[in-house]
Image (cartoon, rainbow, N blue to C red):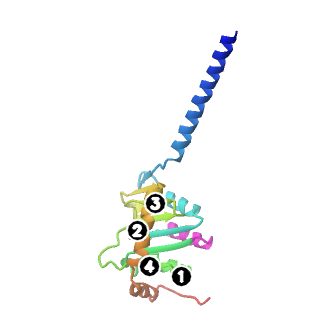
Amino acid sequence: MLIYRKRKFLQIVYSLLCSLIFLTLSFQAICIAKPLVYFSLYDDPEAVIIEHLKRAELSIHIAMYYLTDSQISQEVVNAKNRGVELKIYLDSSQIDDKYSKSRFFINEGIKNIRISSNSNLMHNKFAIIDNNIVLTGSYNWTASASERNDENLLVVDDETIVQRYQDYFNFLWEEKYSADKYQELMNHPGVHLTTD
């Protein structure tokens, strides 16, 4: 009888250890960053971007070559209205482009915009949400990317990669902007400044 109890006890201990190991490995797997990819005309990258903008609590830092999507732009304004810190870094084409949302942002009270000093293209397409998610890929925030083009959006939550993007964004923001081009944007006929 004593041998039977010992064996039963060892089986229970073994079972508990196996369960504990399984739970530990499962928890680690959940904590490991899992990049996700979405494709236009196949998935809905626009909806994914909007969902991440809606969830933003602290900050949204955007570096975007071409930004014309009305729904995404409205969600950026909604984030500003919730008190989320915004920094928007754009290619110089966005000063005069007919569909650019740069003037819409300024008219909606977002002044924290910088224009690239690159005389060629500022061709980045990424956003950092709350310093813990990066949205990147070929996907410009445009209706064409959503409705016509073959594009991709990658969502990354790896801490090291997010920090690398944030460091690069800080470099662009601090070192590669044009005060003259920003002033050109502010003087654009489409900007209607109101006095507060």
Asked whether the beta carbons under mark 1 and mark 2 sit within 8 Å of each other, the answer is no
Viewer-side residue, 41 vs 127? 127
The image shows residue 34, relative to residue 193, as above or below, that is: above
* Image spot of residue 8 (x, y percent): 65, 17
Mark 3 surroundings: few (<14), some (14-19) or many (≥20) residues within 10 A: many
How many angstroms separate mark 1 from mark 2 (CA)? 28 Å
Image position of 167 (left or right of 60): left
Residue holding disc 4: 114
143 falls in the magenta region: no
Q: Judge depth for marks 4 and 3 and give the one in front.
A: 3
Q: Judge depth for marks 4 and 1 and give the one in front.
A: 4
Name the residue type under label 1.
Answer: Asn
Residue at left offset 41%, top offset 86%: 179
Q: Judge depth for marks 1 and 2 and give the one in front.
A: 2
Residue at left offset 50%, top offset 59%: 133
> Upstream in the sequence, badge 4 or badge 2?
4
Residue at left offset 51%, top offset 58%: 47
Residue 168 badge: 2
How many angstroms separate mark 4 from mark 2 (CA)? 15 Å
Mark 1 surroundings: few (<14), some (14-19) or many (≥20) residues within 10 A: some
> Upstream in the sequence, badge 1 or badge 2?
1
- Residue 178 in view of the camera: yes
User: Magenta residues, as a range?
Assistant: 71-84
Residue holding disc 1: 107
Viewer-side residue, 24 vs 194? 24
Name the residue type under label 3.
Answer: Val
Residue 162 badge: 3
Name the residue type under label 2.
Answer: Tyr
How many angstroms separate mark 3 from mark 2 (CA)? 10 Å
